[in-house]
Amino acid sequence: MAKVRLSSQRPVNEESLARAHSPFLESVRHWIEPSESISSFRGSYPLHPSISHKFLFTLYYKVLYYEHMTSPALFAPAPATSCFERWYRHFLDNRNDLDSLPWREPYRLSATELRLVGHSVQQFQLGEWARGRGFRRRAAGHVGFATDQWFLPALELFIAEEQGHSEMLGRFLDHEQIPHLTNEWTDNAFRRLRKFAGLELCVTVLVTAEVLAMSFYQALRDATRSNLLRSICVRILCDEAAHLNFQALTIGLARQPLSGRSRALRSWCHTLLFRGTALLLWWQHRRVFRAAGWDFGRFWKDAGRWFALLQQRIREAFLDRDYSAALDALRLD
């Protein structure tokens, strides 16, 4: 091993120095990432004051070479798979055959049941449908996600799954001979809000509705004696539980470059949006909840529980640089 001489210092053997500073070798992968600054590099690894920064960087690159040649496992490349590849495969495997639902069930909703749940099913059938053109456009133009080869394909399957929910509810409306809605003011308001937003806010608005849908579909499942409607609700609940994780991962990664203060502000605004939307949902669909035996306290507690889990998943996504928590959790329940 070659030796280098610092001014007015005795010769320094680089191999010995490298062995003496094993923490440097153990954490070198963190230092070669673009996000790390020079100041954090020096601060994280204090050396003897007699060693100049010029020598530090010379030694840095030589140690990289030395370790790469003698211990390839340490510098084995990280897996090339995206954190969204698993989600793509999840959505691909989760594609459901709508014909497996009991469409031939002879039971029809009673007049009372129609009055209690009919309009709510109409509203959610309209709300579940979206072409997703704006969503795709924002994703394709986002600096952090456009370069991910798996995000857009996963997003396509996510949108298709949401459209499948609308199709299921639409077929149920046809089964009960209930007309479809083509326009509704709350749906219009949410669509306009998403239209004027960037990717993060677009996903935030969408996932807020889906958090509250978890409570709604639980109540709708128990509000009637229709086995078909119960089966539809169970199918949608299973899908939506995974959707919350997918969107939490998206939001968390979008917020990762932000400061802690900026993330806290966004979380606070999201909480306000959630609470306001929850009050609106209860006011519009309180008949469904009451038919299932829910009062406002139970609804508020259940919706808050789902929202707290969503916030936890978002924090895990932007704090876990290996995304292990987001990858391992495909369901919230």
Image (cartoon, helix red, strand yellow):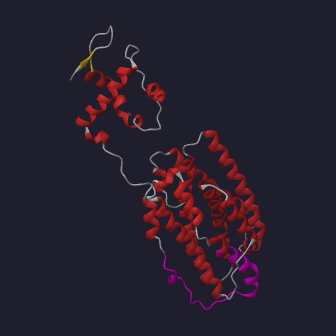
The answer to whether residue 47 is left or right of residue 216 is left
The spot of residue 49 in percent (x, y) is 41, 14
Q: Quadrant where the N terminus lies?
A: top left
Above or below residue 41? Residue 6 is: above
Q: Is residue 124 magenta?
A: yes
Q: Is residue 333 visible?
A: no
Quadrant in which residue 93 is drawn:
bottom left
Residue under the point 32% across and 7% down: 8
Q: Nearer the viewer, residue 63 or 196?
A: 196
Residue under the point 30% across and 44% down: 76
Which residue in the rendered view is the most extreme toward the left?
Answer: 1
Q: Is residue 86 magenta?
A: no
Q: What stretch of residues is rendered in magenta?
A: 96-125
Residue under the point 62% across and 44% down: 263
The spot of residue 78 in percent (x, y) is 36, 47
- What secondary structure is the stretch in magenta mostly built from? helix
Residue under the point 56% across and 55% down: 248
The spot of residue 288 in percent (x, y) is 73, 74
